[in-house]
Amino acid sequence: MLLARIIGTATATTKHPSLEGWRLLVAQPLMQDGKSFDGDPQLAIDHLGVGVGQTAILTSDGKLTRELMKDDSTPVRWSVLGVVDE
């Protein structure tokens, strides 16, 4: 799991068929303090409606993501697992 701040959204004109209809977020990983940035931004799919500026919990659990997307061949690595209450 990864704690990340949502810093934007992404649009893809050409994408894997499994991404059709999914919202793509640009998520900046955070350090343990929840404030400092840690590493490069990641792309994640969103099914909870997380907004830009919110902090989310991301998961790289492939089985969960494949079940969520109902596609065994999806290339997605990160998906939103929850939103952090502030």
Image (spheres, rainbow, N blue to C red):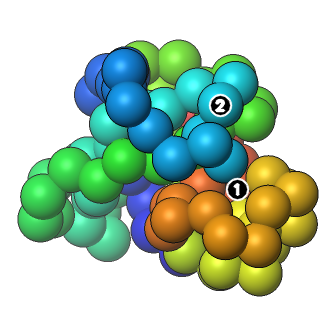
**Image quarter hosting the N terminus:** bottom right
Q: Is residue 44 above or below residue 40?
A: above
- For image coordinates 70% across by 25% down, the residue present is 21
Pick the residue in front: 18 or 56.
18
User: Residue beneath label 2, please?
Assistant: 20
Q: Which residue is mark 1?
A: 81
Q: Residue at x 67, y 47 (%)?
A: 18
Camera-near label (1 vs 2) is 2
Mark 1 → mark 2, Cα distance in angstroms: 19 Å
- The disc placed on residue 18 is none
Q: Mark 2, residues whose alpha carbon is within 10 Å: few (<14), some, or many (≥20)?
A: few
Circle 2: residue type = Glu
Q: Quadrant of the C terminus?
A: top right
Asked if one can make out residue 18 in the rendered structure from this viewpoint, the answer is: yes
Contact, mark 1 vs mark 2 (Cβ under 8 Å): no
Q: Residues within 10 Å of mark 1 (few under 14, many from 20)?
A: some
Q: Residue at x 38, y 31 (%)?
A: 14
Which percent across, then down, holds residue 28? Answer: 26, 47
N-terminal of the two: label 1 or label 2?
2
Secondary structure type for disc 1? strand
- Dot 1 amino acid type: Leu
- Horizontal side of 7 relative to 59 (left or right) equals left
Depicted 41 relative to depicted 61: above or below: above
Q: Which residue sits at x=24%, y=66%?
A: 31
Judged from the image, the secondary structure of the residue bearing numbered disc 2 is loop
Q: Nearer the viewer, residue 6 or 74?
A: 74
Q: Is residue 31 left or right of residue 44?
A: left
- Where does the image place residue 58, in percent across and percent down from the top left? 55, 59
Q: Is 33 above or below relative to 45?
A: below
Q: Which residue occupies the foreground of this view, 56 or 62?
A: 62
Q: Nearer the viewer, residue 8 or 35?
A: 8
